[in-house]
Image (cartoon, rainbow, N blue to C red):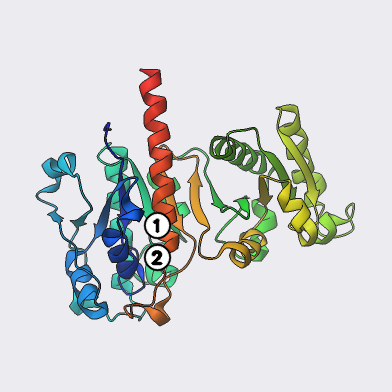
């Protein structure tokens, strides 16, 4: 979109959570914005109120919805795109509220529209509250599902990455009892290929992947579970190998993440949410980044929740948001370079 620094939309997240605070910290942190120009898609009134309550600097530049069509091309410093989706009279910081859930959805929806229109170069999202989202009438279970639906992605998946560990997920925000019914050879293979492509770009070499089993001991040759390993996981691995991927598995999930294995593995393919989130959050809670793969636009995110218990108290750590924005900028710059070569 531009030969200058990429412009990254940063959705403000749930107004009642720590999203406003970490966005304020981002806007004021020069080292965090040296690789891009962040534009917070949110509410200026909420950010100003949070700044007053926490003692953080208020936003220096605010762009209204009326100004956006012309102003977005001239953005050359951190700014706020004021969507006026909620007022301070509508909610209490730290409390779950359907109005904040719907507002957080509006920020995401507008950021996706702007990215698809080429008005910004990538998106980084602050945390939303799934209960508030549901109370606000939004039936998507999380960011990943919203982005996949709104961009009409043919295949998409969640990948969490850090210096310590990288995991791609076959299923995400569903109950455990639903997981076996969502496993198919095609879905597992899609996730393998999406993760292999993304990690290859990030690492600069063909990645070595490990696929976890679903059941204890990876099924123990059919003794545990309903032969999910034999029916879906092993055939997907065999097809991936035939397509040239370096891949091992299925491995028992309880030993897959041992230090030696992590050291020699670029990414792990996990069958369900907590199979990868638990080791990731133990090893890299403040630095792991969430990427939605398979989209026509760039989307990264923090890997933590709204932390309502410390919201608006000047206690939130913004490091995960900094890292998320930096990665979005890095991916956007790489995409711009690829586009320049292609043309």
CA gap, disc 1 to disc 2? 6 Å
Q: Residue furthest top?
A: 343
The residue closer to the viewer here, 82 or 214, is 82
The residue closer to the viewer here, 77 or 343, is 77
In the image, 173: left or right of 146? right
Image vertical order of residue 223 relative to residue 312, above or below: above
- The answer to which quarter of the image holds residue 139 is bottom left
Residue 163 position within the rendered picture, expressed as x and y whole percent measured from the top left: 58, 53
In the image, 23: left or right of 83? right
Q: Are marks 1 and 2 in contact (CB under 8 Å)?
A: yes
Numbered tag placed on residue 318 in the rendering: 2
SS for callout 2:
loop
In the image, 70: left or right of 194? left
Numbered tag placed on residue 322 in the rendering: 1
Image vertical order of residue 53 relative to residue 20, above or below: below
Within 10 Å of disc 2 (Cα), the crowding (few <14, some 14-19, many 20+) is many
SS for callout 1:
helix
Residue 32 position within the rendered picture, expressed as x and y whole percent measured from the top left: 35, 55
The residue closer to the viewer here, 181 or 40, is 40
Numbered tag placed on residue 152 in the rendering: none
Residue 310 position within the rendered picture, expressed as x and y whole percent measured from the top left: 39, 80
Residue ID at (43%, 40%):
331
Residue ID at (38%, 67%):
133
Within 10 Å of disc 1 (Cα), the crowding (few <14, some 14-19, many 20+) is many
Say whether residue 213 is visible: no
Residue ID at (67%, 48%):
269
Image vertical order of residue 27 relative to residue 71, above or below: below
């Amino acid at each position: 979109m531009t030969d200058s620094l990429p412009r990254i939309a940063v959705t403000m997240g749930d107004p009642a959570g720590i999203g406003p605070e970490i966005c304020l910290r981002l806007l004021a942190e020069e080292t965090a914005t040296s690789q891009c120009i962040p534009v917070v898609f949110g509410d200026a009134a909420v950010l100003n109120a949070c700044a007053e309550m926490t003692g953080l600097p208020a936003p220096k530049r605010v762009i209204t919805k009326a100004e956006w069509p012309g102003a977005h091309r001239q953005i050359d410093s951190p700014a706020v795109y004021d969507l006026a989706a909620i007022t301070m009279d509508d909610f209490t910081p730290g409390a779950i509220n359907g109005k904040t859930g719907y507002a957080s959805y509006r920020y995401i929806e507008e950021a996706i529209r702007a990215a698809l229109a080429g008005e910004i170069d990538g998106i980084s999202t602050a945390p939303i509250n799934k209960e508030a989202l549901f109370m606000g009438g939004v039936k998507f279970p999380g960011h990943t599902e919203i982005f996949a639906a709104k961009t009409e992605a043919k295949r998409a998946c969640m990948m969490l990455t850090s210096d310590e560990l990288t995991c791609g997920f076959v299923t995400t925000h569903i109950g455990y009892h639903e997981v076996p019914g969502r496993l198919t050879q095609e879905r597992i293979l899609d996730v393998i290929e999406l993760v292999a492509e993304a990690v290859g770009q990030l690492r600069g070499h063909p990645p070595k992947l490990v696929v976890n089993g679903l059941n204890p001991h990876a099924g123990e040759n059919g003794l545990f579970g309903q032969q999910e390993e034999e029916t879906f996981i092993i055939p997907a691995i065999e097809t991936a190998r035939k397509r040239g991927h370096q891949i091992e598995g299925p491995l028992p999930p309880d030993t897959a993440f041992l230090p030696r294995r992590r050291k020699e593995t670029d990414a792990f393919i996990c069958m369900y949410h907590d199979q990868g989130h638990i080791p990731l959050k133990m090893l890299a809670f403040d630095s792991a980044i969430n990427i939605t793969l398979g989209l026509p636009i760039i989307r990264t995110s923090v890997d933590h929740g709204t932390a309502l218990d410390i919201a608006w108290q000047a206690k939130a750590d913004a490091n995960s948001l900094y890292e998320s924005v930096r990665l979005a900028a890095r991916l956007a710059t790489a995409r711009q370079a690829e586009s320049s070569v292609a043309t």
